[in-house]
Image (spheres, rainbow, N blue to C red):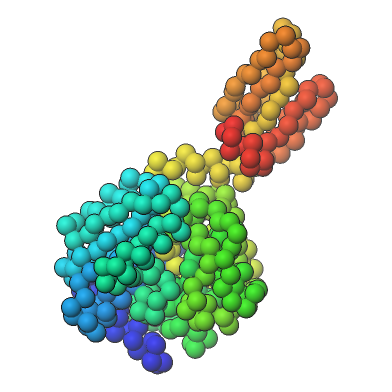
Amino acid sequence: MTAFAENARSATLALRDLFDPTPLQRNDHLSAKYGAEIWLKREDLTPVRSYKLRGAFTAMRKVRAADPAQGHFVCASAGNHAQGVAFACRHFGVKGTIFMPVTTPQQKIDKTRAFGGAAVEIVLTGDYFDQTLAASQKFCTEAGAHFLSPFDDADVIEGQASVAIEMLDQLGRAPDLVILPVGGGGLAAGVTGVLRDQGVDFRFVEPSGGASMTAAIAQGGPVTLKGVNSFVDGAAVARLGALTYARLAWAKPEQILLAPEDRICITMLEMLNVEGIVLEPAGALSVDVLPELAESIRGKTVVCVTSGGNFDFERLPEVKERAQRYAGLKKYFILRMPQRPGALREFLEMLGPDDDIARFEYLKKSARNFGSVLIGIETKAPENFAALTGQLDAAGFTYRDITEDSALAEFLI
């Protein structure tokens, strides 16, 4: 066993003061679907519903062992790291100051406050995370506190490695393949640090709109992405950590997979509806890429790390919407409707038995022969839209499919 793995095992033992090992569950549904032994490492079942508690607790424990007088910790986070730090602060009886963007959903603020209790103070500042981070680091320096990075910290990485230690103990052997979500790289750096010398293969999964590891491997070092899609908030990181990159630089580009944000929604709904498992977008990343790996994993033992389950059900309509659009079951059109009796009825008669109008806005302009209709249609099979547009073309209707036009869709839908 390497020195890193030995330290990770010590960190794992210390974590038992907080919670039992998270389950490693064989998933019958996925195993049958892919002809493999698919296991889920359920990090969505920690006390804070994500693996982040592991790193926060381990780093805090080691800092206090080295400097018992340090009783103040600071972090910047709008999600799982904040909740992990809050929980650890309450456990150790130390003060925590947690900086969150002003735009943070109230549900996340309330959960962080509930986990930390009187031990934590929440400071809302900045519209964007970079502003929040700068404010937290400035405060930390002035207050003489210890800053807890969400991923770019050796002790945090060691804590996240406890996931691999538990995995080995629970499975009784090393799996053939481990699929890991990647944001800043802390979880991936920790798990691979334990398992890499045991013949385990790895796949790393990033959201398409936050591929910081892909960029780092391609450029030979961390680079800052120009823009990040924040939907997969638990993994939407613009820059891979320096320490995490150093521990992941061996990865090959073909080991990194990108998951489209809308496709992740299909996976979230499947896991919820079929398995009753609530996953946040980042927590579904490892499961989402299984179809891409179907041929290569047949007959193998695969562990998917489901990294978090902090999902606000107020987002469920958005998740369903994204899933339907990606599957080709929902489209939005702007239709140019003639201003004559019977025109609307003529259009409605073109709809098939499985087509349903989900959105209808008629935008008539005075003194014009045509009006514009924003219409959303749901159907049961993607090919139904080909039949509909074929009829529209034959009837001479003018229309525009805006489903994939992000600017128009965001403004109108």
Above or below for 68 versus 372: below
Place residue 369 in its image quadrant: top right
Residue 40 shows up from this direction = no
Q: Quadrant of the N terminus?
A: bottom left
The one of 311 and 121 positioned closer to us in this rendering: 121
Instruction: Answer with left or right where residue 234 lies relative to residue 216.
Output: left
Count of numbered tags: 0
Above or below for 119 versus 250: above
Instruction: Answer with left or right where residue 217 lies relative to residue 9.
Output: right
Q: Residue at x 71, y 34 (%)?
A: 401
Q: Residue at x 31, y 64 (%)?
A: 139
Picture coordinates of residue 62, whole percent (x, y): 27, 81
- Furthest-top residue in view? 341
Q: Residue at x 74, y 15 (%)?
A: 370
The one of 184 and 389 positioned closer to us in this rendering: 184
Instruction: Answer with left or right where residue 78 lies relative to residue 369.
Output: left
The one of 239 and 135 positioned closer to us in this rendering: 135
Picture coordinates of residue 48, whole percent (x, y): 30, 60
Residue 100 shows up from this direction = yes
Above or below for 364 versus 207: above
Q: Quadrant of the C terminus?
A: top right
Q: Residue at x 66, y 15 (%)?
A: 364
Picture coordinates of residue 264, whole percent (x, y): 54, 53
Above or below for 166 versus 323: below
Picture coordinates of residue 260, whole percent (x, y): 59, 55
- Furthest-front residue in view? 142
Place residue 203 in its image quadrant: bottom right
